[in-house]
Image (tube, helix red, strand yellow):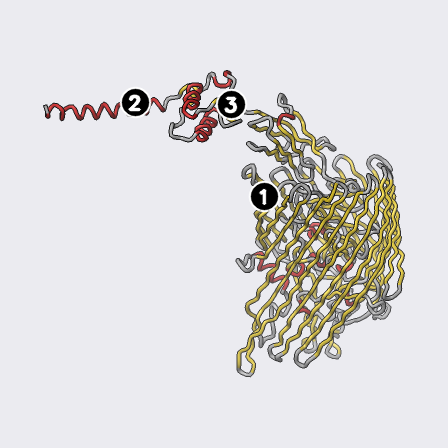
Amino acid sequence: MQIKIKCYIPILLILLLSSISIHGQETDKKLPLKQVLDEISTLHIITFNYESSYISDIKVFPPPTELKLSSKIANLEKQTNLVFKRVSNLVITISKPIKLCGYIKDASLQQPIPGATINGISAYSITDDNGYFELELNSLEELLTVKHLGFKTIKREVKYFNLEQCGSLYMLEQHEQISAVLIDAYLVKGIDIEQDWTTSVDYDKFSLLPGLIESDVLQTVQALPSILSVDETVSNINIRGGSNDQNLILWDDIKMYQTGHFFGLISSFNPQMTQTASIINNGSDVSLNDGVSGTIHMKTESKLNTDFEGIIGANFLNAELFSNIPLGKKSSLQVASRKSLDEFVRTPTYDVYFNRITQNTEAEENTSEVTNSNQDFNFYDASLRWLHKLSDKELIRLNFTLASNDLSFNETANVEDISRTRQSSVSQNSLAFGFNYKRQWSNKFNSTFNIYNSDYELQAKNVDILAGQLFLQKNRVSETSLKLENVFKTDLWQHKLGYSFTETEVINLNDIDQPRFVRRDEEVLREHGAFLQTWFNNNSFSIRGGIRANYITKYEKLLIEPRFSIRKAISENFEIEALGEYKHQNTSQIINFQNDFLGIEKRRWQLTDNDTIPIIRSKQASIGLLYKNKGWLFDAKAYYKTVDGITTQSQSFTTKYESAREKGSYDVYGFELLFRKQFKNLSSWLSYSYINNTYTFENLEEIEFPSNFDITHSFTFGTTYSNNRWNISAGLNYRLGKPTSIPLADNEVIDNEVNYDEANNERLVDYMRIDASALYKFMINKTFRSEIGASVWNIEDRENTINNYYRVNNISATQFSRYSLGITSNIVFRLYF
């Protein structure tokens, strides 16, 4: 009997395994969905509500019984493409997904908007070049958010869309009421001409310019006619032949005295924080003071943000962070910061920039007996903007910004057979805050009160290790200002009345320890201003006129400044304009010695003394003709400007008159031409500028001679391709070399000084640069999107001479030159969420 049982054991095992196998195969077979739902309903005590037609022909693999209910539902959703929605603890509804399609269009132009995002809870989509989108959604109550930069955000539940056909949804552009666009896409998308005669850059709509992968305002403006930088820095922008200190730079109505990182090679204003920028070179609004050559006004976003947004990015120079934080329904906060990468990694781009700023300075090469080491440079900035809606009629804005540049290096030498090391350094810092209050008293009347404080400091510690000497230099500016502005509007008229007060303090310090020498100069200037302006504007004719009265208390001086602007449409395609203004300013940047502040940033701010440093005053007038039709644009302007009260110290002389201390004036006349052709996704332009810029200094050897900023001819050619994925741009910049003075042939040195020929009778070699850049944008998922880009500056690696100077070498004069950036590449990556 025992033997028989042993014989049956293998048979029993085979039958048992077969049973298990058969059971497993049965569970792998598809079953009717209704049967599976009934089993789940019984097991989990749940009820499924559905139309029988939805599931009648559907079969599924039963989910494993050991799974939780939520996992089983997720499993069935994947298999059936049906929507399971739990409406209570005991009921789950089953429905088919909702298919939605449509076209997103511009409400004003009736054109498709590519690249718009449509976000829901369960799905997202991006419109194509035709503005078309489609997606599948789970519920009619699902809220969709439609967004595109430069347009007002739309939020709408699915049930309010046309689900039976692909309809059109129209988006409205996001514009301030008084800033209606006169010319759209003046150069490229995002650069427009407003009806108040300003050139506006809207970075929400901005595509790309050659050589740029950042929305750097002070680089962007140099693409416009008659705006350039003779030394290729953003801190030395020349508008219609003026020097850099004659530009008024505003950030959310705060005057800024520092404009660059890398001591001028890139802007110190965080590009993620700046939404728009206005560029004004004539016909200024009467509420603006200072800036006899021009105004660049950067602004942050002016509306409350209801959605959290963030950006993390890095390029070969810095890392950046930006966040847009809603604080309830009545407040929103924007914060942004950038930090250089030098402390973490030294990139080739960083090396090129560093070598450029230290070129021909003590930081690059010291005397033969002194060795430099541990060269270090870093920069950072941080910005904050807070908006709070006190009521439906009241809005307040707070701003804060700081920026810093720090360069240091060690100097080592043998002093009395002992090796000694000391550190030299130069730093540049800004700190500013502002408060803005606006009240809308009625539909026609509003008031704005603005107050700010702006502090700037430039400091250098220059060690002479051989002499055991330390030279400390400081230049500090502290300015406080308040302004009250009242505006009354009707359909065709706008009237403005206001008052401003500004107090500016400038401190200059020179401190030498051995032999002991200290000189500290402190000056304070207070100015009151009152202004009145009237503006009539309809579709075909616009005229704005106003007057500003300024009173400088220290000198008991009253300055009256009229301003006007006129525009008239003479046909459907042609318009003419005429602009004029009087302006003044009380501050200027001067150079005492070329080696001040280690020669890195040798300019210092100085207040007028109404004598040797006069109040700078300007008069300017211009006329223009504009033609636009079917994507073609032709814009021509002729202008004349005279500026009185300049000094030789403020004009960046490095050759003849480098040490002169005289006051004078300059006169400029010129014209600007711009041709632009816009296709569907392509914009190409050619601009030309002619300038005749002449100095007048009564007490110099030559009373009249060409200005240091007399760039007689300059050309810019560029083209940009843009769609919802790609921005690609390339272009060329060419201009005549800047004027310079050279030593007199065969008699170069007299009394151990360079003997120069006539002032500015020669020119440097012509400047030419070819740039290219590209950005690619893509969606990672419905939460994250990204962009990656690359740029090449000066593709040909052309050695452009931007300045020269001479030093005595025995009986001859040796020439030294400073050069622009060579070929410089950069790469950027950003993550948006």
Mark sitting on residue 94: 3
The residue pinned by badge 1 equals: 832
**Residue type (three-letter) at the residue carrying disc 1:** Tyr
Mark closest to the chain's N terminus, 3 or 1: 3
Asked whether disc 2 touches disc 3, contact meaning CB atoms under 8 Å apart, the reply is no
What is the quadrant of residue 372 in the picture? bottom right
**From what the image shows, is residue 38 above or below residue 421?**
above
Q: Quadrant of the C terminus?
A: top right
Q: CA distance from mark 2 to mark 3?
A: 32 Å
- Pick the residue in front: 830 or 701: 830
Look at the image and tell me in which quarter the N terminus lies. Answer: top left
Amino acid type for the residue under numbered disc 2: Ile
Q: Secondary structure at mark 1?
A: strand
| Measured Cα–Cα span from mark 3 to mark 1 | 35 Å
Query: In this rendering, which labeled residue sits more in front, label 2 or label 3?
Result: 3
Q: Residue at x 50, y 16 (%)?
A: 52
Q: Judge whether residue 527 can be spotted in this image.
A: yes
